[in-house]
Amino acid sequence: NDGDLLLIDAGSHLNHYATDITRTFPVNGKYTGIQKEVYSIVLEAQKSAISHVFEGRTQNQLHQATSKVLAQGLIDLKVLSGSVEEILENNLHRKYFPHGTGHWLGLDVHDQCPYFESENEYVRFEKGMVFTIEPGLYFPKEDESIREDLKGIGIRIEDNILVTEKGHENLSAMIPKEIKEVEDACQEDISKFY
């Protein structure tokens, strides 16, 4: 329907290795004002997490960076109140961000690699590791505690990130994710692909 969003979580395999990419598209080709606000928060959270990818970092550090941006966004949207620290400490943001920031990627879409070295020690990133970064915000239609214009909005942005000697490489960077890029892609004539 006009004004709806379409979230596509897709992947493929190349030489036995998996990809896992998500984009959220406006069905009519243009985001509404509130959809742009939510999309911008999720995109900022994803960029924040990606900027933290270096050898020696952990999945938990990325999740904390993502969660801080999303918590502030939920305050800005007037969905939650209080400080970012209080929201994170009490996991209030989890109602709208109910999953992790990402997962290992390799021979399987959710590669079976450990997240912990030991009971309290997270696995540290090393050159050659690949994982997803996929923050999202989801506002159920049935949620009576939120504004009407937020109800039914669900946005996730997912990319595949490779840890390199100098930091990271976004292996899915060629797929549009900036608001204007996505809207422009929605306006393209796709008949050439038939």
Image (tube, rainbow, N blue to C red):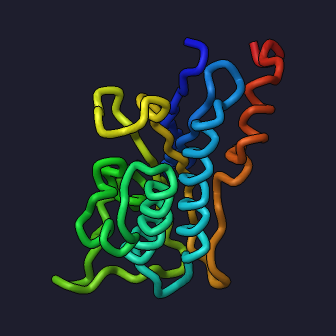
Nearest the viewer among 21 and 73 is: 73
Residue 179 at what x, y percent from top left? Answer: 71, 42
* Tally of numbered tags: 0
Q: Is residue 182 above or below residue 128?
A: above
What residue appears at the point 60 percent right and 45 percent down from the top-left corner?
37
Residue 72 at what x, y percent from top left? Answer: 48, 63
What residue appears at the point 35 percent right and 27 percent down from the top-left corner?
141
Nearest the viewer among 179 and 78 is: 78
Does residue 84 appear to the left or right of 164 in the view shown?
A: left
Q: Quadrant of the N terminus?
A: top right
What residue appears at the point 65 percent right and 35 percent down from the top-left corner?
33
Q: Is residue 139 above or below residue 171?
A: above
Residue 105 at what x, y percent from top left? Answer: 44, 57
Q: Is residue 110 above or below residue 35?
A: below
Residue 34 at what x, y percent from top left? Answer: 58, 37
Q: Quadrant of residue 189?
A: top right
Does residue 76 appear to the left or right of 109 in the view shown?
A: right
Q: Is residue 102 above or below residue 167?
A: above
What residue appears at the point 48 percent right and 37 percent down from the top-left corner?
9
Q: Quadrant of residue 84?
A: bottom left
- Is residue 147 visible in this depiction of the protein? yes
